[in-house]
Structures are given as C-alpha cells and as structure tokens.
Image (tube, coloured by chain):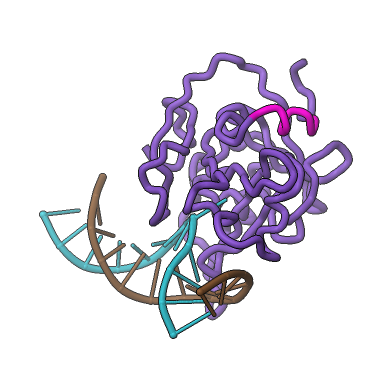
Chain colours: A purple, B brown, C cyan
DNA sequence: GGATAGATTTTCT
DNA sequence: GAAAATCTATCCG
C-alpha cells in the first residue's frame, strides 16, 4: 500500500534497531500553520534501554517520560542549549527506547525550509545567513532537520497519527541499500553500530 | 579538505 | 556546576 500513513502497528512491529532501518525511505511530514514540509528519511540512529548513550539508560525522569510510552510517540529534546532533536519512540510501553531521525531528503515545502533556516540560532545576536543553503544542507543533521521542519518541543510527546500535524508515510521502495556505522557525537556506547543510512544518498549528514 | 573553539540552556548530580 | 544524541565560523594546509 503505497502512499499510506504509517499506523501505530507499524512502529510496534519491530525492535528498535529494525525500526531504525525500516524508517529509512519513509517520508516525514509536518503540516504546520505556516505550511507543509516533508522529506524522505535517509539517516537514523537507534537508542536502546541497555545502551549507555540512551537518555533512558538511567533513571526514569520527566524529560524522558515519552520514551516509555507506546511506539510511535514523538520525543523532542533540546541539545546544547540551541537545537531540538526529533525521535520516534519504539518498543513496548514501559521500555525507554527511540530512533533519532538524523537527516532528510527534502520533498515538500523547500522554500519554507529555506526560510526557517535563514536565521542562525543565537540569543545575543541571531544572525541572518548570508550564504544560500543547498537543498542537501537544509535537513542535514538532527538539529538542522528539526529547524527546517518546524519541529519544536510543542510537538514533544505526541502520537504520530492521522489527524495530527506530524506523521510518517510508508515508503514505496522495498529494497534499499542500507549502510550502518557507529553513532555520531556521543561519548559512550561508541562501538555500537546503531547508525543506519541509505547508501550513496547525498542527503546523509556524514560519510 | 580537516581541526578547533564558541554559542547557549535544560537537565541531572 | 558540569555535561549534553549540535552547528557554525574561522584557521590552517
């Protein structure tokens, strides 16, 4: 069934690492008041409950509470004081695991993405970007992706379903060439090959 | 092309 | 009070 919104049963059908691979090639859509943006998911990372890099590795806290919700819940958090990151919660209720979406190939609303990315974040002196971004830079990396898509913490702890503003479409291609590697920007769990990406796709954040 | 420093604030110790 | 699932500008070769 091409062109259908992923049902909750999809998110619940796989373990976290499998879901991270299955989400590749799917299209993330945000229907915001400003307009619709979307992009093909080309890069993900898995965070498991027995993995020291996972936010839910230690105590269950207020911030990570959505990670313990049902698969298909959104988990959005602020990192380094400036950037938001978007995750899809995975596994069963009560188990704190999620998939970080790291890069998109823009499809809809490219002009809106450019507009949202035209300001460089910064409290003291938010700067206007001087150089025009290339399309493959708009959603490169989790912080940039969230900004281009207009995903903020107001979308934290929502269910990715029909009727909501944020959801994911099924992918059409079944046989994707998928690569894996260690994850980016972490200091623990370095050796785990929990990063997945579409091979030879120029929208991936890093080789 | 790669390496490095600085921005910024929430969260947890 | 330190660390953090990041990004950008700047320096250097």
Residue A131 location, x and y as percent?
46, 55
> Which residue is more in the foreground, A123 or A66?
A66
Indicate left or right for A38 with A56 as reference.
right
Figure label count: 0
Q: Is residue A150 above or below residue A173?
A: below
For image coordinates 79% across by 24% down, the residue present is A4
Q: Is residue A75 above or below residue A5?
A: below
Which contiguous range is marked in magenta? A7-14
Indicate left or right for A182 with A173 as reference.
left
Can see residue A121? yes
For image coordinates 71% across by 61% down, the residue present is A153
> Which residue is more in the foreground, A135 or A79?
A79
Q: Is residue A77 above or below residue A38?
A: below
Q: Quadrant of residue A15?
A: top right
Residue A158 location, x and y as percent?
79, 50
Residue A132 location, x and y as percent?
49, 51
Q: Is residue A141 above or below residue A71?
A: below
Q: Is residue A8 magenta?
A: yes
Q: Quadrant of residue A202?
A: top left
For image coordinates 37% across by 47% down, the residue present is A190
> Which residue is more in the foreground, A99 or A34?
A99
Q: Quadrant of the N terminus of chain A?
A: top right
Q: Is residue A137 magenta?
A: no
């Amino acid at each position: 069934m091409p062109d259908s919104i992923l049902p909750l049963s999809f998110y619940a059908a796989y373990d976290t690492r499998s879901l991270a691979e299955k989400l590749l090639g799917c299209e993330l859509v945000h229907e915001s008041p400003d307009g619709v943006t979307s992009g093909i998911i080309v890069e993900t990372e898995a965070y498991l409950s027995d993995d020291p890099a996972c936010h839910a590795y230690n105590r269950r806290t207020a911030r990570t509470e959505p990670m313990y919700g049902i698969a298909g819940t959104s988990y959005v958090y602020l990192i380094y004081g400036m950037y938001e990151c978007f995750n899809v919660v995975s596994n069963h209720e009560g188990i704190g695991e999620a998939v970080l979406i790291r890069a998109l190939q823009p499809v809809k609303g490219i002009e809106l993405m450019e507009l949202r990315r035209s300001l460089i974040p910064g409290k003291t002196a938010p700067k206007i970007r001087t150089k025009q971004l290339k399309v493959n830079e708009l959603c490169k990396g989790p912080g940039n992706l969230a900004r281009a898509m207009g995903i903020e913490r107001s979308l934290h702890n929502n269910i990715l379903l029909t009727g909501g503003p944020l959801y994911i479409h099924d992918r059409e291609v079944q046989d994707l060439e998928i690569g894996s590697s260690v994850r980016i920007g972490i200091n623990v769990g370095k050796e785990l090959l929990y990063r997945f990406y579409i091979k030879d796709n120029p929208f991936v954040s890093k080789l």
